[in-house]
Amino acid sequence: MISRIDKDHSRFREIVRGKIRQNLRKYISRGDMMSRKGKDTVSIPMPQIDIPRFTLGGKGKSGVGQGEGEPGDPIDGGQPQPGQPGPGEAGQGEGDKSLEVEVTLEELAAILGEELGLPRIEPKGSDALDTKKDRYVSLRTTGPESLRSFKATFKRALRRQVASGTYVPGRPIIVPVREDRRYRSWRTEPRPQSNAVIIYMMDVSGSMGDEQKEIVRIESFWIDTWLRSQYQGLESRYIIHDATARQVEREVFFRTRESGGTMISSAYKVCAELIEKEFSPEAWNIYAFHFSDGDNWSVDDTSSCISLLRNVLLPACNQFGYGQVESPYGSGQFIKDVRGAFGADEKLVTSEITSKDDIMDSIKEFLRGGR
Amino acid sequence: MAPISGELLELQARIQGYADEYGLNYSPQVFELIDYEQMCEIAAYGGFPVRYPHWRYGMEYDHLVKSHTYGLSKIYELVINTDPCYAYLLEGNSFADQKLVMCHVYGHNDFFKNNRYFGPTDRRMIDVMANNAARVRRYMDRHGVGEVESFIDVCLSIDNLIDPWAPFREPPKAVAATEGEDEQHRLRNVRGYLEDYINPPDFIAKQRQRAQAEKEASKRKVPQRPERDVLGFLMQHAPLEAWEADVLGIIREEAYYFLPQMQTKIMNEGWASFWHSKLMTERALDDSEVIDYADACAGVMSMAPGQLNPYKIGIELFRDLERRWDTGRFGAAWDDCDDLQAKESWDLQLGKGREKIFEVRRLYNDVTFIDEFFTLDFCREQKFFTFNENRRSGRLEIETREFDSIKQKLLGMLTNFGQPFIYVVDANHLNRGELLLGHRHEGEDLKVDYARDTLRNLERIWRRPASILTVVDDKPKRIRYDGSEVTISDEPATFKL
């Protein structure tokens, strides 16, 4: 039976979800969400959900207390806590009562999906590939002591003692011997899985500033969150490029700042190699995202990019997303060239991001295809 | 959930014996043993096993369970004002803790039964709440969860607008026309021949006419006098569906039920603590439990800086009272005595302390309790101070140890539980059927953003524009919601009764 409070609790959770949905744009454009990420949950700060009443405003905190001290002595111990609104700031009362809501990434992805109206993704090659997973389901007679199953061991011992007549019901002492010991053991189970990989590419040339990188970081977090909710065991790869490209770790991806020219084709080449070597398009759902400020070095390079896209990348990928972040230095020409070359190709999605507020729309543009 | 048995039941019998011995007068007491989640559930429901469905209970529950999980708080005991009196014990508490809780509960029980302010409450509230819940569920089945829930939100938004004295007031009787009403406009005239000069006939006639017109107008005015029971007023006069009126009635009924608990927080907790301390230290406590008891007790009585602990101030006041009436330190002789030495050794051996505290627990509420018994000596002894927030550093600082300002502040915090005084002034404002409320300003402004949202909710109930007269930054203002937007405008004068 579901107890009453569980119903009320889930109503409350629904309201919280509603609030998150309402303010999703705000949460998305703020970068601090990722830093609040725990293992599987994100804790989101939100103002206390309150029932409005006629109440007295109060000018600052005051009251009556009890204890030692002279007038003028502070009574709240240490320093004022950082993060609390400073004195004299408006809305102090509400600031204090903020609610930390823990939401699982899965739930967050669902909220994102609902809010943006994202279609569920139809995976391809879903049963083409099996993964294997070990599960501890059986017992055996040898193994490390740390895996000894006490219950099974004592059962064996009991059975042996009953059989050999040494068990006294009035004084039920059971002593397991070496032969009684049982250890937990695993069985490897095949598990059908749909595989997906996201390949992020980013232009790190001199023209990409910190703010542009922040936008990319936030956007890839949300794309990641959504795609992860759609696939188990999502892989991700990161490629950075200026005039040359290389594959890097996640941390490096977001931090590096080189300062060279820009040859986008270099990144596309690395991406193509990566797909060829590791991710066969028959078995993998491949998503590639490329973020740049749209400033390519030469027209020649742009045309080689387009031929790479046409001949290699687009056929292999479920979707290729190109996001152009507006930067004060870039010409922003690349997106026009790409659009000119591919026009209405469904697999290629382009999006222009001028500021953090556009991130949400951009995510929507990238993901609404449901491929 | 299960009634207690075995050892705990024996313990209850023992403690009840001690309570009898000290003359506590309680309703039949029932203890139930529950686990922590159940405790949180019941606490979220305000002590009752069944309440109407609403998300705020879920929020409260979420909060309680979390703060328990993180080790921030622990609910020891829950007791509710019913007959028989139900109290919940937490499974897994130590025996010493259970003892303490039982003693404490007998104190509460005695207080519920005997304090004047609890007199009008319904002692079968468990059933009433369950019935209310069933009705609300039925409305939800019929009209949809969302609709009923949002109406409950609206009602809760004004559930503090009730009249604390309504339960004690006799229903209004029709007032007979007073005689000589006519005469009140006449000046007294001892010399007959000056009558026309002192009371010119046309002036008197004018006055009479005016009074007549006023009377007529006030007869038509609803309410005739500003009405504090806003909830009750809306129930009678607002254009509500039957189910809405019922839901509003349920909220009002439950608000009135919880009212005395707010009116007597300090006394109630003080009284219960006084008795647990007495029963434990003089009777129930075993030698082996002294440390645990002292630890638990210190936890309950501790005073966090910047927070008033009702347990602490209550118990100390009752102890002080008992001592004063035992030694005769009261009355004119004591007040007039200026000799410090004589005062220090003052002992008339009256032994009236016990009698006095029982009388006080019967007749007083927090405001009158503090007003009468919070004395200069007590204030000094207990090291009270007022504190303020230092605007520059954002820290709380001790402001003063001056008796008068401390008492003033304390009473100010307790008066109307720190809530504003709000009245229905006119139900047909501007002859347009608008609702006009008045806020009796006592020095502190309303929170304007909250007031706005509350007005929206009032408009939802009244279905016509709603306004409130109040004061913002020392200027009389009117906040009005007309169904589409909130406006704040100047007013010529502040609202007064």
Image: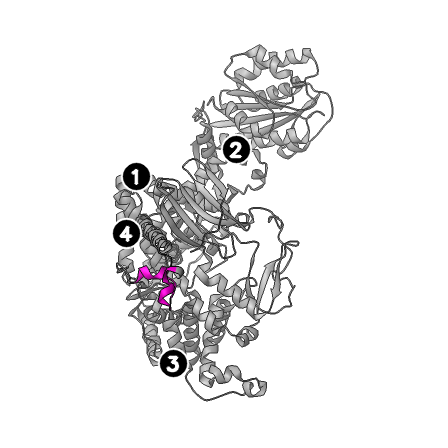
Colour mapping used in the image: one colour
The amino acid marked with disc number 1 is: Gly
Residue beneath disc 4: B132
In the displayed structure, B32 sits above or below A88; it is below
Sequence-first disc among 4 and 3: 4
List x then y, in percent, for residue A331.
68, 18
Residue beneath disc 2: A25
Q: Disc 2 versus disc 1: distance between alpha carbons?
A: 30 Å
Q: Are marks 2 and 1 in contact (CB under 8 Å)?
A: no
- Residues flagged by tags 4 and 3 on a common chain: yes
Q: In the visual, does A99 lie left or right of A137?
A: right
The amino acid marked with disc number 2 is: Arg
Dot in front, 4 or 3 = 3
In the displayed structure, A18 sits above or below A77; it is above
- For label 4, the crowd category at 10 Å Cα-Cα, with few meaning under 14, some 14 to 19 and many 20 or more, is many
List x then y, in percent, for residue A357.
57, 30
The amino acid marked with disc number 3 is: Glu
> Which range of residues does the magenta coloring cover?
B180-196
**For numbered disc 3, what is the local secondary structure?**
helix
- Residues flagged by tags 1 and 4 on a common chain: yes
**For numbered disc 2, what is the local secondary structure?**
helix
Can residue B136 be seen from the camera position used here? Answer: no
The amino acid marked with disc number 4 is: Asn
Dot in front, 1 or 3 = 3
- Residues flagged by tags 3 and 2 on a common chain: no
* Count of numbered circles in the view: 4
In front of the other: B224 or B234: B224
> What residue is at 29 percent from the left and 70 percent from the top?
B27
Q: Which mark is residue B355?
A: 3
Dot in front, 2 or 4 = 4
List x then y, in percent, for residue A236.
56, 30
